[in-house]
Amino acid sequence: MARASSGLAYPERFYAAAAYVGFDGSPNSNDKDIGSRFSTDVALILYALYQQGDTVLIHLLKVVLMIAMFIQRDVNGYWKQLGNMVSAEAMRLFVKILEEEEPGWYSRASNSVLEPVTDVQMNHNAIVEPIIENRNSFAETKTISAENGGLIETQDIDVVSEGLGSVVVYDQWTSPTITGQRPKGRYEHAAAVVEDKMYIYGGNHNGRYLSDLHVLDLRSCTWSKVEAKVESKSVETPSPVNITPSAGHSLIPWENKLLSIAGHTKDPSETFQVKAFDLQIGTWSMLNTYGKPPVSRGGQSVTLVGTTLVIFGGQDAKQTLLNDLHILDLETLTWDEIDAVGVPPSPRSGHAAAVHAERYLLIFGGGSHATCFNDLHVLDLQTMEWSRPTQQGEIPVPRAGHAGVTVGENWFIVGGGDNKSGASETVVLNMSTLAWSVVTSVEGRVPLASEGLSLVVGSLNGEDILISFGGYNGHYNSEVNVLKPSHKSTLQSKIMEGPLPDSLSAVHNATNPTRDLESEFEVGQEGKIRETAIDNFEPMKSKGGETSEHILAMLKAEKEELESSFNNVKLQSLQLKQEVADAEARNTDLYKELHSVRGQLASEQSRCFKLEVDVAELRQKLQTMETLQRELELLQRQKATSEQVAINAKQRQGSGGVWGWLAGSTPQNADDA
């Protein structure tokens, strides 16, 4: 007979929730405290439901007054149904609203509530499911059966720890105690760690997009809400900005800012948005980028590689799946669309991406409208070529909506699902060998097996820790879970027993620099020395007349000769290296000279082109002058002819002709003559 814990049933659960809120009927209960903990809408609804569920009408007048005040602000139709609601429905609705507002109330209230313990008959196939209240994991007993039906192991499924300082177990998820105002449950949000603080921004809750910003202090394990301001005018944005709620975006730390990249919004636009939150002054602003930005989208992957952001895939506002590739230079804020060679991943969203050795972009999983994937694609960021190498080890099941982070050369993948069930395994990929291993598994519908959760890497006492938050698995989660990954290289032990496949060797060799020529030469020479010594030693053993001293002397002399030869070869190698270096230096000088000559040639070509233009202009002017000259000569001839005609006419008029002479007429004056 095994014992399993069960949660409080109704009405005990309702009264526990009411006591947690403060509606315990005692004279010490303070309505002002309730009003300060919840919004006015929620406080009024809870109070009315408490009265309806408790069926105690002591404060009926106060309820009527509250309903009169709230009659114009009906939420989800609760007020319309309150009058006809039975006591049991009011109790369940009261607990439901409290769970939405404070998902962790039961774990905090359960410290003072004694839960009933029931006996459960266990057979050889029975496994007690963990009790999940608001997706908070309690220490539950799990019984694993052997093949013969005997019980061989009983252990706790989850560990609830007091702060991050108590995380001492490797490769096991724990649920630390968190204080402060916990964010509302959500998924498709984004998270980032900056200086021992985890920031949570946006997400989706009950179909509503969020725009709140919360921070978890990893040292004190305390939540707090950041009251962010919107920067009205700045150098980047001359007009007021509108920070719209979003989900499916990415959050990238950059310098003293948090960059929110893309995401789905209520009123989608074609503009790809890049928002920046200044951590020093606490303001949001919209970055003004240059070039052709990608189409707006959500569910994409954004990977920081050096000073650039690599954006792949996602789903646009028309629910069209994408597999395009874009790069944003964060120094110049300039977009560049990449047309890579090879076969890219199929269009998808909800995948995970990571960078290895600052050169290789890895894409894993994701989903389309009909199916989920577990394929692995690699993009060489130097050659911009896609490849699909062979995966090794325990390949994960298809999933989408998962989250991933890198610790060294290990890529951890958590959560996700295939539209039927959540992925319960936390897996890790060694990016040098492309081999998968399972780190740990969880049981039941817990946040770690949900979609749209976030995963970041923090630091605890000099060691890396994985921190997950939120997710959706039929419930909007707001829990924090922590895992300390093992620093031992046990994840590769099973993989390295066999030979490395050719497809992995190509990637592995590409990520490792070529060994120095001199070291390879030394290894080869040493191998030759050992081989020669063994070959020479074998026949000597058959010569009975020779002593061992003579054999050793011969081997020593031959060894010295080989060492001398090796030194000579090494010296020649050094000389060749020096000659190569000199040739490279000369080549560099020649290249510089060639570059200078090319510059001079370009300058001369430019000057020649200018001279040709000047000559063409002069030729045109010369042709114009010749035309003018011809016109001038023509005008001069016309003028001379006109003058001659005028002179002749005057002479005829002045002489009077023969008849005038006969008549005895004379010129009137000398001018006429």
Image (spheres, helix red, strand yellow):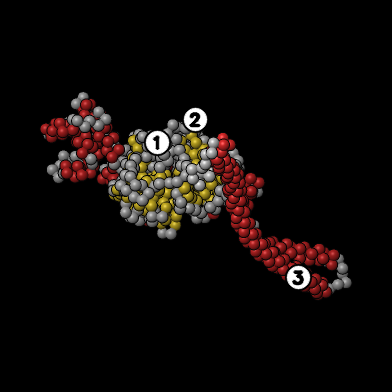
Which is in the foreground here, disc 3 or disc 2? 3
Q: Is residue 53 visible?
A: no
Amino acid carrying mark 3 in the image: Asn
Label drawn at residue 568: 3
**C-alpha gap between disc 1 and disc 3:** 72 Å
Amino acid carrying mark 1 in the image: Ser
- Splitting the image into 4 quarters, where does residue 189 fall? top left
* Cβ atoms at labels 3 and 2 below 8 Å apart: no
**x and y, in percent, of residue 447 in the image:** 40, 41
Q: Residue at x 64, y 59 (%)?
A: 597
Quarter of the picture containing the N terminus is top left
In this image, 471 relative to 70: left or right? right
Which structural element holds mark 1?
loop
- Sequence-wise, which precedes: disc 2 or disc 1? 1
- Sequence-wise, which precedes: disc 3 or disc 2? 2
Which is in the foreground here, disc 2 or disc 1? 1
**x and y, in percent, of residue 449 in the image:** 43, 40
- Count residues near mark 1 (Cα–Cα under 10 Å), then give few for <14, some for 14-19, many for 20+: some
Which is in the foreground here, disc 1 or disc 3? 1
- Splitting the image into 4 quarters, where does residue 33 fall? top left
Amino acid carrying mark 2 in the image: Ala
**C-alpha gap between disc 3 and disc 2:** 69 Å
In this image, 51 relative to 157: left or right? left
**x and y, in percent, of residue 219 in the image:** 35, 56
Q: Is residue 45 visible?
A: yes
Residue that carries the numbered disc 1 in the rendered image: 269
Which structural element holds mark 3?
helix
Q: Residue at x 46, y 36 (%)?
A: 315
- Splitting the image into 4 quarters, where does residue 271 fall? top left
Q: Residue furthest top?
A: 84
